[in-house]
């Protein structure tokens, strides 16, 4: 992540963020979650950023399929507004999961990238499964894999893995969850990723399998080169809870040479990460003429270390998400063609904040 070098013309268009309200904010999502109807629009693409038609999109008790342009809409879905979960399935692709904050009685936008499900590796469910991929190694226990009826599966287990590093340019749309987690103290925290893996397990008929949640899975991930010097000796090891939508810390990982390694029992999406405190930012992002800056990737990073959070403005230009607490931040807007169109320092924020952010006369591409 880095500062966008703005032209002098664009700098003249940048106006200050108008802070409306600030209040204290707790971070204990185990309390009764706020449930309300909300609507969702989005775009599902492949690794070449081409639309995926006929993908199944699920949220709450509703589902739909993408059209020929990879677009979908879901209306008035009852969700946890702190962590609405969108899951996407399509034959030939690794399942996608995205978590986002939702406006009660409002609407959200998201883009999700699905990776090809390449089944080049397999093991017997009745034996130790030692599976190596670029950047990731997994070791499953014998008789650990179960079918959809939670019965032990002893046949051939095919494995597809997507390894995601924090420097991957498509991390904002490819990652699972939304880089928010629950630490061992039960607090909602921001996550600084040192590597993430998404794993799909299939039987001989391409039907989904899963670990039993009791036996250990050993996970080893390569620490990306730029992050090795700052990588701590021990680190949180999280799995994605697809019920709550949060990354849940289960245990610790340990640095061994250029790798992190650790053992978990739950999940099929895993993440090594350190943590930081969060607050909520609810912002209207507007062009200079007052028109909304809609459907833009909004990256809000810490100014000093560039730890990012990602979300999208909705069609009304509204952003809702968690950001780092008590730190100066950099807000970056990226258009649908991947162009950086605006950047500004905002914050710091010590609690829930509502703000208007004027982004100037943006030049936004039409893909």
Image (spheres, grey):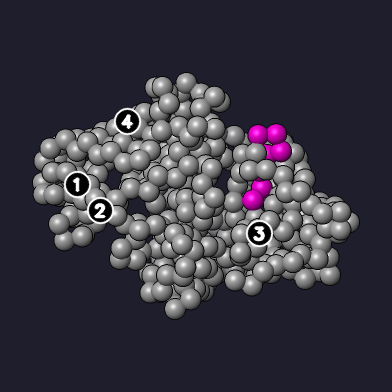
Residue placed under numbered mark 3 in the picture: 339
Residue under the image location 31 percent in, 41 percent down: 133
Residue at 30% in and 66% down: 91
Query: Is residue 77 on the magenta stretch?
Result: no
Residue 162 on image: x %, y %: 37, 48
Between disc 2 and disc 4, whose residue precedes?
2
Q: Earlier in the sequence, mark 2 or mark 3?
A: 2
Query: Relative to residue 20, is residue 28 depicted above or below?
Result: above
Residue 189, given in percent of the width and then of the height, sits at 55, 38
Q: Which mark is residue 122?
A: 1
The answer to whether residue 365 is above or below residue 68 is above
Q: Position of residue 273 (x, y in %)?
A: 49, 34
Observer-side mark, 3 or 4, equals 3
**SS of the residue under disc 1:** strand
Instruction: Where is residue 319? Give x, y as percent.
Output: 67, 58
Span of residues in magenta: 299-305
- Dot 3 or dot 4: first in sequence order is 4
Residue position marked by numbered label 4 in the rendering: 263
Find out whether the residues at labels 2 and 3 contact each other: C-beta distance under 8 Å: no
In the picture, which quadrant includes the C terminus? bottom right
Tell me if mark 1 has few (under 14), some (14-19) or many (20+) residues whose alpha carbon lies within 10 angstroms of its own: some
Q: Residue 119, labelled with which disc?
A: 2
Residue that appears at 43% across and 63% down: 46
Q: Secondary structure at mark 2?
A: loop
**Towards the viewer: 187 or 267:** 267
Task: Measure the alpha-carbon separation of dots 1 and 3.
Answer: 40 Å
Q: Residues within 10 Å of mark 2 (few under 14, many from 20)?
A: some
């Amino acid at each position: 992540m880095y500062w966008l070098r703005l032209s002098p013309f664009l700098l003249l268009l940048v106006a200050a963020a108008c802070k409306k309200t600030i209040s204290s904010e707790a971070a204990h999502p185990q309390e009764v979650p706020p449930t309300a109807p909300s609507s969702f629009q989005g775009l599902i693409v492949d690794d070449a950023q081409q639309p995926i038609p006929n993908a199944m999109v699920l949220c709450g008790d509703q589902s739909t399929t993408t059209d020929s342009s990879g677009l979908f809409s879901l209306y008035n879905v009852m969700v946890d507004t702190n962590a609405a979960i969108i899951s996407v399935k399509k034959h030939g692709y690794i399942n996608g999961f995205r978590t986002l904050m939702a406006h009660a009685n409002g609407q959200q936008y998201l883009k999700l990238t699905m990776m090809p499900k390449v089944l080049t590796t397999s093991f017997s469910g009745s034996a130790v499964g030692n599976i190596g991929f670029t950047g990731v190694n997994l070791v499953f226990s014998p008789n650990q894999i179960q079918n959809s009826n939670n019965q032990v599966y002893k046949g051939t287990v095919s494995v597809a893995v997507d390894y995601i590093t924090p420097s991957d340019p498509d991390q904002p749309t490819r990652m699972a969850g939304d880089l928010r987690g629950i630490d061992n103290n039960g607090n909602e925290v921001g996550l600084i990723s040192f590597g993430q893996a998404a794993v799909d397990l299939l039987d001989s008929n391409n039907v989904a399998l899963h670990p039993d949640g009791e036996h250990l899975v050993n996970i080893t991930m390569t620490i990306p080169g730029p992050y090795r010097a700052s990588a701590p000796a021990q680190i949180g090891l999280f799995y994605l809870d697809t019920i709550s939508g949060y990354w849940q810390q289960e245990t610790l990982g340990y640095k061994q040479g250029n790798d992190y390694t650790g053992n978990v029992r739950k999940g099929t999406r895993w993440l090594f990460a350190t943590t930081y405190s969060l607050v909520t930012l609810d912002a209207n992002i507007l062009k200079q003429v007052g028109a909304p800056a809609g459907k833009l990737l909004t990256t809000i990073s810490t100014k000093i270390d560039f730890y990012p959070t990602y979300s999208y403005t909705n069609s009304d230009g509204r952003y809702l998400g968690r950001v780092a607490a008590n730190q100066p931040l950099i807000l970056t807007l990226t258009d649908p063609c991947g162009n950086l169109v605006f950047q500004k320092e905002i914050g710091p924020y010590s609690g829930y904040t509502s703000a208007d952010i004027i982004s100037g006369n943006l030049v936004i591409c039409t893909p």
